[in-house]
Image (tube, rainbow, N blue to C red):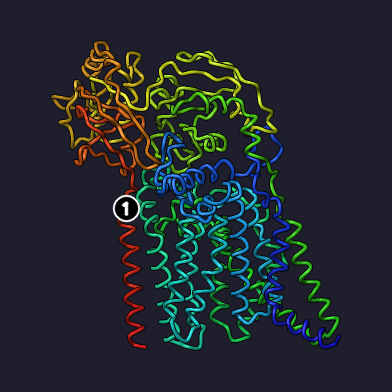
């Protein structure tokens, strides 16, 4: 019996590290057990409900559905999302997470399970990163496991987990691994470069998973070992090693993420944040986390961890992690430092909410807490049993305090049950026949009903896309009097929504709006089941002025001038009572293309002999005369249109003169390319935000979307691979 007991004890000791980690992982999974069932999602919420809904369901899941369908049904990367906001770029939109673990899981499990299980896997991965890093710093397994638990119970992580901010969860849980690998690069006796490359690659992957904000701050963390090098005994050699490792990690991050990072950089100037945010908008007093400052026990053990590492002759890593934690706190709390960064650091003006820098605190701090916990245990060891009780009391104070303030999981609901009871959306899915739909109470970029429309495959014209084109959706950062297409559409919804191919509109109240008639009134759905309430009607109206996805007109007005001025002039013309989209198209022509063929030409903030300034009596008379005499083409010349996956469309052009107009925002982003019979076919911006072609008189027009800068990004990634391959070959030859 004693022999068996001794063998069991020996086995337990050998497996103690795994047992300690498995124990805290089980505790965390219990805390997040609501995310385990495969068929539910966090409740979407509604202003009338007494709880805060989760952003995961209305914001991230619709993007994920588009990415999963593109990859697993169409065999393509989801560059374009036709389901949201009248068609929007998906790949280059920050936080989209097109190439994420959830996208890969979506091919084998239902999307509800894919997004939740991927988030849980990231939390466990972050815990493992903290555990392994702490063990590398000679922290024993029980204290390393305590650090992993502290990481998972951190309010910054769990608050964002509760509200479904995958753009914070995914990268923050990868940061501990990036820190660990960079530390190995700083301490390894050989192959330093490969550890640094691995560190940067992990951080680069977080960009693909939608982690632009924490990854942006993470660049500082990867570069800060340079500032900690003087505290190492290696002197100049230590500094050069830190400089080389940090540079290699940051370059690898940029190279790995380049296929998506470069399109993002080119896309941002087109959005509502194109010029960056004002300082007051960027600093913002918004608090996304209920308890942004960690517990007193956390702060104390974190500080003691720096001391413990310093005393154990690990001074460089002590200073490095201390700098990372201190920088996170300072950016989050110091308006002066935040202003300096906003003023001087490239790209910082796109950042919002200073509190988000606490991602660095939540990622690096738990490693220091683990080291501090071990230091306390060693310090009180001489006190025998009383000292051990004191130490255990400190640990209990820490864990109980963190458990007490961790936010509750949101209510869960079944999307399938919601769709089954949402009679309005079911009616649209059965009758829309490919046309777009709209919810009357969604006038801007704020929460729509994508959590219902995206799973049903319905295309809508407003969605929560915080970085949508500044000419299309109203933004929180628009100056007073700023015109947008959807904003102006509120004055004449039938006309403006019609050119966006909107045939049916849901409304929570009865309407008497010109150009609409009631089609049906469906059975209401209780708000406890259908969220938001506006997604369930019950009134369904048909737009009498809706246009097909592609149509032909014979007459055109060319507005010549700078892009923004031409856009606003085009909106003015579309507001004229005589304007009908099926008779005349309004082309928005850059000044360099002032010779564009059209029946009438006017200037936007400019005037030439051939183009009188719009707003003058001459220009207005010419436009109104054309609108009065124009007529709709014969129906038998209407173009045929097909969507071939998310990134490709086809148009069978009619054998007739005039212009082909497509209800897709082709010219806004620069990534669409049109070809006819193997040759490029130019198109021009039309009717505010649409695209138009000179009718090619027969043939099939192929439209393909590829983000601007994607090829350059792939070239940068390929260059990185070639450079690493040459380095590996050279190292192999030397060895």
**Does residue 54 appear anywhere in the picture?**
yes
Identify which residue, 348 or 732, lies in the foreground.
Answer: 732
- On screen, 288 above or below 189? above
Residue 254 on image: x %, y % = 39, 63
**Does residue 613 appear anywhere in the picture?**
no
- On screen, 326 above or below 532? below
Residue 730 on image: x %, y % = 32, 82
Identify which residue, 550 or 600, lies in the foreground.
Answer: 550
Q: How many marks?
A: 1
Residue at coordinates 81% horizontally, 80% vertically from top-left? 388
Which residue is disc 1 drawn over? 709
Quarter of the N terminus within the rendering = bottom right
Q: Quadrant of residue 375?
A: bottom right
- On screen, 604 above or below 340? above
Residue at coordinates 82% horizontally, 88% vertically from top-left? 3
Identify which residue, 383 or 676, lies in the foreground.
Answer: 676
> Which residue, as the protein is rendered here, is positioned at the far left?
609
Residue 369 on image: x %, y % = 66, 72
Identify which residue, 272 or 519, lies in the foreground.
Answer: 519
Quarter of the C terminus within the rendering = bottom left
Residue 528 on image: x %, y % = 70, 33
Residue at coordinates 32% horizontally, 64% vertically from top-left? 718
Q: Quadrant of residue 343?
A: bottom left
Other residues around mark 1 within 10 Å, as few (<14) / some (14–19) / many (≥20): many
Which SS class for mark 1? Answer: loop
- On screen, 378 above or below 215? below
> Which residue, as the protein is rendered here, is positioned at the far top?
629
């Amino acid at each position: 019996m004693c022999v068996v007991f001794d063998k069991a004890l020996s086995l337990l000791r050998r497996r103690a590290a795994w047992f300690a980690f498995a124990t805290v992982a089980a505790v965390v999974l219990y805390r997040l057990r609501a995310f385990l069932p495969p068929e539910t999602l966090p409740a979407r919420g509604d202003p009338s409900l007494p709880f805060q809904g989760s952003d995961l369901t209305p914001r991230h899941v619709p993007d994920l559905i588009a990415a999963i369908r593109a990859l697993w049904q169409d065999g393509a990367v989801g560059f374009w999302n036709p389901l949201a906001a009248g068609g929007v770029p998906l790949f280059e939109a920050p936080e989209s997470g097109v190439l994420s673990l959830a996208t890969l899981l979506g091919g084998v499990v239902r999307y509800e399970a894919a997004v939740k299980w991927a988030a849980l896997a990231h939390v466990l991965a972050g815990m493992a990163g903290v555990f392994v890093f702490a063990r590398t710093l000679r922290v024993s397994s029980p204290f390393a496991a305590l650090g992993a638990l502290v990481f998972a119970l951190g309010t910054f992580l769990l608050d964002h987990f509760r509200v479904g901010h995958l753009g914070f969860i995914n990268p923050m849980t990868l940061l501990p691994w990036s820190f660990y690998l960079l530390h190995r690069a700083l301490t390894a006796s050989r192959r330093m470069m490969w550890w640094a490359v691995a560190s940067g690659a992990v951080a680069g992957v977080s960009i693909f998973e939608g982690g632009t904000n924490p990854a942006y701050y993470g660049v500082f963390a990867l570069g800060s070992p340079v500032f900690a090098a003087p505290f190492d005994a290696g002197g100049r050699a230590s500094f050069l090693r830190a400089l080389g490792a940090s540079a290699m990690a940051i370059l690898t991050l940029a190279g790995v993420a380049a296929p998506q990072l470069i399109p993002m950089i080119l896309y941002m100037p087109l959005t509502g944040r194109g010029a960056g945010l004002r300082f007051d908008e960027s600093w913002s007093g918004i608090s996304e986390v209920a308890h942004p400052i960690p517990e007193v026990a956390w702060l104390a053990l974190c500080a003691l961890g720096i001391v413990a590492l310093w005393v154990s002759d690990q001074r460089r890593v002590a200073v490095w992690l201390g700098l990372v934690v201190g920088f996170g706190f300072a950016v989050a709390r110091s308006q002066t430092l935040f202003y300096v960064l906003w003023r001087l650091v490239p790209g910082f003006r796109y950042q919002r909410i200073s509190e988000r820098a606490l991602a660095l605190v939540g990622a690096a701090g738990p490693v220091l807490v683990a080291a501090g916990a071990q230091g306390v245990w060693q310090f009180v060891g001489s006190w025998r049993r009383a000292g051990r009780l004191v130490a255990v009391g400190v640990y209990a104070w820490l864990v109980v305090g963190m458990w007490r303030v961790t936010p509750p999981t949101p209510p869960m609901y079944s999307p399938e049950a919601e769709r089954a009871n949402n009679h309005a959306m079911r009616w649209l899915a059965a009758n829309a026949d490919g046309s777009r739909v709209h919810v009357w109470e969604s006038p801007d970029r704020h929460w729509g009903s994508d959590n219902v429309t995206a799973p049903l495959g319905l295309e809508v014209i407003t969605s929560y896309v915080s970085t949508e084109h500044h000419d299309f959706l109203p933004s929180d950062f628009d100056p007073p009097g700023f015109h947008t297409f959807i904003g102006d559409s509120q004055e004449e919804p039938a006309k403006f929504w019609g050119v966006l191919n909107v045939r049916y509109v849901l409304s929570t109240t009865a309407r008497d709006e010109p150009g609409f008639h009631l089609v049906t009134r469906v059975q209401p759905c209780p708000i406890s089941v259908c969220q938001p309430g506006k997604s369930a009607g019950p009134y369904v109206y048909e737009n009498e002025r809706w246009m097909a996805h592609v149509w032909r007109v014979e007459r055109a007005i060319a507005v010549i001038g700078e892009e923004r001025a031409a856009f606003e002039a085009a909106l003015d013309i579309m507001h004229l009572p005589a304007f009908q989209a099926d008779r005349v198209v309004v082309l928005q022509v850059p000044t360099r293309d002032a010779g564009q063929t059209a029946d009438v030409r006017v200037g936007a903030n400019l005037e030439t002999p051939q183009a009188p300034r719009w707003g003058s009596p001459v220009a207005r008379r010419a436009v109104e005369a054309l609108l009065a005499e124009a007529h709709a083409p014969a129906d038998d010349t209407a173009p045929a249109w097909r969507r071939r996956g998310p990134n490709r469309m086809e148009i069978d052009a009619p054998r007739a003169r005039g212009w082909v107009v497509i209800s897709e925002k082709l010219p806004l982003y620069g990534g669409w390319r049109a070809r006819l019979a193997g040759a490029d076919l130019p198109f021009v911006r039309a009717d505010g935000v649409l695209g138009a072609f000179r009718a090619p008189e027969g043939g099939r027009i192929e439209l393909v979307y590829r983000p601007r800068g994607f090829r350059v990004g792939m070239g940068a990634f390929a260059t990185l691979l070639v450079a690493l391959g040459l380095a590996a070959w050279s190292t192999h030859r030397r060895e």
